[in-house]
Amino acid sequence: MVNNKIKTDLKEKKKFYVTTAIDYVNAEPHIGHAYQKIIADVLARWHSLIGYEVFFVTGTDEHGKKVQQAAEKAKESPKEFVDKISSKFKEAWKLLNIEPDRFIRTTDEDHKVVVKDFIERCNKTGDIYQGIYEGLYCVNCEAYYTERDSDNGNCPVHKKPLEYMKEESYFFRLSKYQDFLLELYDKHPEFVLPDSRRNEVINRVKEELKDFSISRTSFNWGIPFPLDSKHVVYVWFDALINYYTATRKKGKEKFWPATLHLLGKDNTWFHAVYWPAMLKSAGIELPVTTFNHGFLSFNGQKISKSLGNSISIKTLVEKYSADSIRYFCVRNFPFANGDDGDFEEKVLIERYNNELANKLGNLVSRVLTLAEKYGFESTENRLLEKLNLKEIEKHINNYELDKALNEIFAFVDLCNEYVQEKKPWESHDKKVLYELLDSIKTIAILLWPFIPSTSEKISKQIGFKIDYKEIGRTLKTKEIKKGEILFKKI
């Protein structure tokens, strides 16, 4: 029996609310977008597996000048354009077995109501005032840059010339919150992870914190600004509020504050500085953690439209399967350190063949074939004593998902070694076969957050529920239904 199981409070479930950045709909989804959503889905499934009440939200960011321009270029109305692109993001996540509890869109009616209320709350606090904004603007980022932050007049992200803009605007008194933010980072270092990103934020906030513009008059594709009908809400102010909007639905209020916001590192400033100040102004509790991860490139190239179908989710899933892409994204890129990674197909194939096919697939195929042929007999599974569940839990709590997978596959290796040592094809030892079947059950349960389709196939072949409480319980199945090979070699 396993004596190191993760305990959960069954009387009152703990809550886990995870969000991702909502994707801007000026272009179609690709593997760079998928990385973050896969991580979120893994964490949501894991917490659900160990007994938490989970709420997972992703969606699309649909307002702003960039979207309006993209719609004009496509000769469509902004709403027609965002409807079409948003549906493609939904389809992409479905292909990857990413299952959010809500797919939120910033054009949703309930979001517009919440944004209006949020602005009015900030206004009552005295944090909104009217003025004139002039400065350098990047349409692609939907953001202003100072001379210092620009790259010789170019956007530091898109490397394109910044536009000089001057317009009437409403501002949020961000400067008022400098001391509050620095105290937040000091007392709650977990608010900005990884540490390297937090240090960058602290240094910049200490230097200077300027008020920021929260409305626009130069275009009209946005939520009407509640304090002035000539203005629309600045896309970043509108977009950040989506995380709160999702919890305003009946029965979802209990999930606020968010446990975890997952973001790309280019969104760090907005979520680590703007967002907590906005929430403080509106009198709303702050989320626990914003995690700002690195970017993916593709086969050594920066992901861009020119790569076309090669980075399409549909193309990759058809080529390699959803589970192999999920596995590779989690196993190959150490998420916890926030570094960039390269989605290299050659390496994906190597991991697929060596780890999924040779190790996991081969173990399941051999053991099920033998158990189907010779039968099995219940006994104490001493193999499970070599599995360290506490270590797996620790890694996942530290966002070291690659290390958690490494720990699980170390146990897969032990099981394969046990097969070689005991040679059940010669001994026909039914108790050995039971130990191996029960160990495969445990492996499948632990792998379900990472490769759900594969785990569910194994559960049907052996006959058990994907349920964390099943780990260490006697395997009660009477019949093995060996199916197709789980992973055919590429």
Image (cartoon, rainbow, N blue to C red):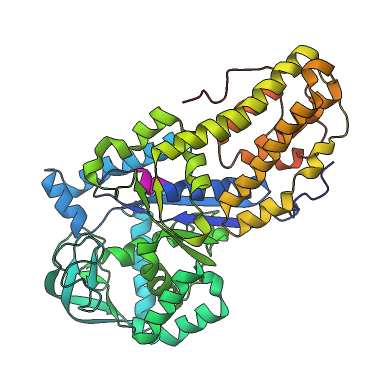
| Residue 348 image position (x, y, % from top left) | 45, 38
Q: Is residue 33 magenta?
A: yes
Say above or below: 135 vs 379.
Answer: below
Say above or below: 442 vs 135.
Answer: above
Residue span colored magenta: 29-34
Please give the name of the residue rendered at 56% of the width and 76% of the height, measured from the top-left corner: 188
Query: 313 or 252, which is in the foreground?
Result: 313
Query: 444 or 196, which is in the foreground?
Result: 196
Say above or below: 171 vs 298.
Answer: below
Query: 45 or 418, which is in the foreground?
Result: 418
Look at the image and tell me in which quarter the N terminus lies.
top right
Number of on-image labels: 0
| Residue 129 image position (x, y, % from top left) | 27, 82
Does 323 sit left or right of 155 as displayed? right
Please give the name of the residue rendered at 66% of the width and 35% of the height, measured from the top-left corner: 444
Q: Is residue 133 magenta?
A: no
User: Is residue 412 visible in this depiction of the protein?
Assistant: yes
Does 199 sit left or right of 76 as displayed? right
